[in-house]
């Protein structure tokens, strides 16, 4: 897709925050509330993380990032993956995951983990297609019903 560009941005930037708000709106519709897991903007600052935005024909249509997991220099956690509804089914989410993984690899990470929810079947299908497999639950939602924890070696 030649008109797709994926670029790093600061998590606190206006474009990133507009996309994050869209994530929260989607979660509100699916779950009746948005992600309550604590996230600090600085967690996505290199070399401990990164936040990327996908632009299609110059318009921001998706995002995703990684942050170091539990202060590990080898494990990264995928966070805030999102693709706008009007841009879905065009390979953008897959391209974002690949870009996030590559960025994490460039910073020495060897494994990526993530949490999602069972009310996001399209996300689970994407991650499974990309080689993610179930792992032990961890983090903020580890004891919640409906949590889906996945990981894969980079």
Image (cartoon, rainbow, N blue to C red):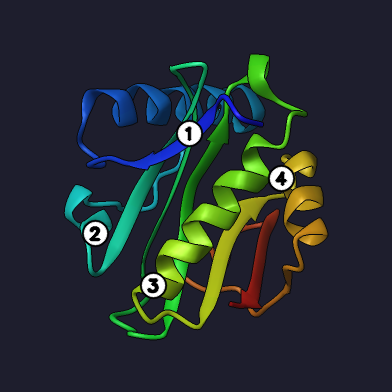
For the residues labelled 2 and 3, say whether their Cβ atoms are less than 8 Å apart: no
Q: 16 above or below 108? A: above
Left/right placement of residue 9 relative to residue 109 reads: left
Residue that carries the numbered disc 4 in the rendered image: 123
| C-alpha distance separating marks 1 and 2 | 23 Å
N-term-proximal mark, 4 vs 1: 1
> From the viewer's perspective, is the residue at label 1 or at label 2 nearer?
1
**Location of residue 84 in the rendering, given as x and y in whole percent from the top left corner:** 58, 22
Residue in view at x 28 percent, y 80 percent? 71
Q: 51 above or below 92? A: below
Residue that carries the numbered disc 3 in the rendered image: 106
Residue that carries the numbered disc 2 in the rendered image: 43
State the SS at label 3: helix
The quadrant of the rendering that contains the N terminus is top right
For the residues labelled 3 and 1, say whether their Cβ atoms are less than 8 Å apart: no
> From the viewer's perspective, is the residue at label 2 or at label 3 nearer?
3
| C-alpha distance separating marks 4 and 3 | 25 Å
Number of other residues with Cα within 10 Å of mark 3, as a class: few under 14, some 14 to 19, many 20 or more: few
Q: 63 above or below 153? A: above
State the SS at label 4: helix
Left/right placement of residue 133 relative to residue 74 reads: right
The quadrant of the rendering that contains the C terminus is bottom right
| C-alpha distance separating marks 4 and 2 | 23 Å
């Amino acid at each position: 897709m030649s008109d797709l560009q994926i670029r790093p941005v600061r998590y606190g930037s206006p474009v990133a925050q507009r996309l994050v708000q869209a994530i929260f709106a989607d979660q509100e519709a699916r779950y009746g509330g948005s992600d309550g897991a604590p996230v600090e903007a600085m967690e996505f600052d290199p070399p401990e993380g990164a936040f990327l935005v996908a632009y299609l024909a110059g318009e921001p249509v998706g995002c995703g990032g990684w942050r170091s997991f539990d202060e590990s220099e080898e494990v990264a956690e995928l966070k805030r993956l999102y693709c706008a509804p009007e841009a879905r089914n065009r390979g953008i989410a897959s391209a974002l995951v690949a870009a996030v993984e590559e960025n994490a690899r460039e910073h020495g990470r060897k494994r990526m983990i993530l949490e999602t929810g069972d009310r996001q079947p399209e996300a689970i299908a994407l991650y499974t297609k990309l080689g993610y497999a179930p792992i032990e639950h961890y983090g903020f939602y580890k004891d919640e019903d409906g949590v889906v924890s996945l990981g894969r070696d980079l």
